[in-house]
């Protein structure tokens, strides 16, 4: 873990080891495949995608990045895990989808090109970094005034512990055991505080309900497990 990059090397190694299976809809990333259409629909409804400059932070193997590019966005995807990024690049080439993938941290990119994106997404990543508040601050710097920041993560509470860890990792084996660390789950109030301190305004919160048996996901008002948060950087801010 380095202070500059706010990265946990053990977390990076975990995703590096699974990189080649990122696009297998029946593999370790099956829940992400099932959740992805709902996440992308939410992003499009909140911020629009066609013609937008979008940054996908913690893009991994590119599930969300490709999906947003297919809807007409000009997408840049960044990650600090080289294996998943290479998988993302190769898959985009094979699929004929244009995405600019970069090995970079949010802090590095925010220093290079602040205020450059219409939409910044950070999906299922904040719960894997030591200091999520620093990432949120960088997201705020990267989006233009009047632009949108959309995050998805997991709430910290008993229901999330039972479903996202006990159920998903140990009972149903949807995810490898140890994928998540409960102490790093983030309550909506905590995420909103980080965003507020970074100069972002909350526009909306939504829960995601996921049925692993039918493999169906839908947006709900229940944020007790998986949830999405939509923030806006006020126009006129420096």
Image: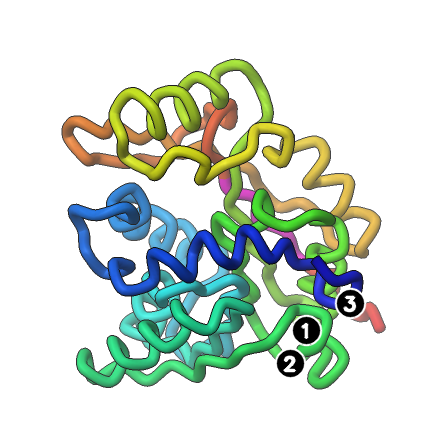
Mark 1 and mark 2 residues within 8 Å of each other at the beta carbon: yes
The residues bearing labels 1 and 3 have C-alpha atoms spaced at a distance of: 23 Å
Residue ID for mark 2: 116
Residue ID for mark 1: 144
Res 142 quadrant in image: bottom right
Number of marks in the rendered image: 3
Whether residue 54 sits left or right of residue 88 in the image: it is right
Residue at the image position 27 percent from the left and 80 percent from the top: 90
Seen from the viewer's position, the closer of residues 203 and 99 is 99
Seen from the viewer's position, the closer of residues 73 and 76 is 76
Q: In front of the other: label 1 or label 3? A: 3
The residues bearing labels 2 and 3 have C-alpha atoms spaced at a distance of: 21 Å
207 up-or-down from 197: above or below: above
Residue at the image position 71 percent from the left and 77 percent from the top: 108
Seen from the viewer's position, the closer of residues 41 and 170 is 170
**Residue 107 falls within the magenta-colored stretch:** no
Instruction: Kindly state the secondary structure of the residue where label 3 is placed.
Output: loop
Give residue 198's position: percent from left, percent from top.
Answer: 80, 55
**Residue 231 falls within the magenta-colored stretch:** yes
Give residue 131's position: percent from left, percent from top.
Answer: 73, 49
């Amino acid at each position: 873990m380095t202070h500059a990059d706010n990265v946990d090397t053990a977390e990076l190694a975990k995703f590096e080891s699974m990189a080649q299976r990122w696009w297998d809809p029946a593999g370790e990333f099956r829940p992400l495949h099932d959740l992805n259409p709902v996440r992308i629909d939410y992003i499009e409804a909140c911020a629009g995608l066609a013609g937008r400059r979008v940054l996908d932070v913690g893009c991994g193997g590119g599930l969300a990045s490709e999906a947003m590019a297919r809807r007409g966005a000009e997408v840049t995807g960044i990650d600090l895990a080289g294996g998943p990024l290479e998988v993302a690049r190769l898959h985009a080439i094979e699929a004929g989808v244009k995405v600019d993938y970069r090995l970079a941290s949010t802090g590095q990119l925010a220093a290079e090109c602040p205020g450059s994106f219409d939409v910044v997404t950070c999906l299922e990543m904040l719960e894997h970094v030591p200091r999520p508040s620093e990432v949120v601050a960088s997201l705020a710097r990267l989006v233009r005034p009047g632009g949108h920041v959309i995050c998805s993560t997991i709430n910290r509470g008993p229901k999330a512990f039972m479903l996202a860890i006990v159920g998903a990792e140990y009972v149903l084996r949807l995810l490898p055991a140890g994928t998540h660390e409960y102490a790093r789950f983030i309550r909506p109030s905590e995420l909103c505080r980080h965003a507020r301190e970074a100069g972002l305004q909350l526009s909306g919160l939504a829960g995601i309900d996921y049925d692993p048996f039918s493999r169906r996901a839908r947006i709900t008002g229940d944020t007790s497990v998986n949830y999405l948060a939509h923030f806006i950087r006020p126009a006129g801010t420096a």
